[in-house]
Image (tube, rainbow, N blue to C red):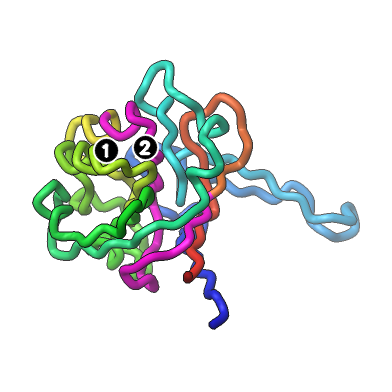
Amino acid sequence: MDKKIIDISVSINEKLPVWPGSPGAEIKTLMKIGPESVANVSHISIESHTGTHIDAPLHFIKEGHTTAEIALSTLIGTCQVVHIPHVKSIGPDELKKIPFEKGIKRILLKTDNQHLWDKKEYTFEEDYCALNAEGAQYLVDKGIELVGIDYLSIQRFHDPIDTHVILLKNDVVILETIDLRSVEAGIYRLICLPLKIEGIEGCPVRAILETI
């Protein structure tokens, strides 16, 4: 059977929902083919946590690793997509119900957030589903090295930063703003590579799943 590639990235554009206060993305045309130019050239200005992106430890840990220092082997490999519907806060009780594949190191959380991407007009939604601090510690204790969520943040909007800190201080990579609408729960091969930019705490990625 041929392997299927599923793009779980959201398209970056100026209408994409962003965290309150973020400038998001700005895309401008610098040159356009015509009488005065033989080429098209664009300028992109983007906040590092816009669209599908990873968080590195430096995001919340003062001396933490940057995105460029994350091992590529962490960002490529077998992952498990788990479906957790009808909840707003994911903790140990929800995670204990999941039959985790033996030895799994990467998990993607498919939640009711997926329906937010069905909207024709995007606005930032505060009441999204995310992982709480106890859930984060549960994943750390299970040896998870990467966790993804299908909205803008791994932690709830009004929660303190504990979820991020617990994950990042244990070098768990966070993959945020993924689109899992067309993905069934199961085992896949994940590839999510950031641009090789030095010294930053977060970076957009093109995230894909490959069927196994």
Sooner in the amino-acid sequence: mark 1 or mark 2: 1
Q: CA distance from mark 1 to mark 2?
A: 8 Å
Q: Quadrant of the N terminus?
A: bottom right
Q: Nearer the viewer, residue 139 or 34?
A: 139
Residue 169 on the magenta span: yes
Q: Residues within 10 Å of mark 2 (few under 14, many from 20)?
A: many
The dot on residue 172 is 2
- As shown in the figure, which amino acid type bears the numbered disc 1? Val
Residue to which mark 1 is pinned: 140
Q: Residue at x 40, y 39 (%)?
A: 173
The dot on residue 31 is none
Q: Residue at x 14, y 49 (%)?
A: 89
- As shown in the figure, which amino acid type bears the numbered disc 2? Val
Along the horizontal axis of the image, is 94 left or right of 42?
Answer: left
Instruction: Determine whether 200 is above or below 176 in the image.
Output: above
Q: Position of residue 78 (x, y in %)?
A: 44, 57
Farthest residue toward the front? 102
Q: Position of residue 58 (x, y in %)?
A: 43, 25
Q: Is residue 116 visible?
A: yes
Along the horizontal axis of the image, is 26 left or right of 54?
Answer: right
Give the magenta-colored segment's residue range.
166-192
Q: Residue at x 33, y 44 (%)?
A: 144
Asked whether disc 1 touches disc 2, contact meaning CB atoms under 8 Å apart, the reply is yes
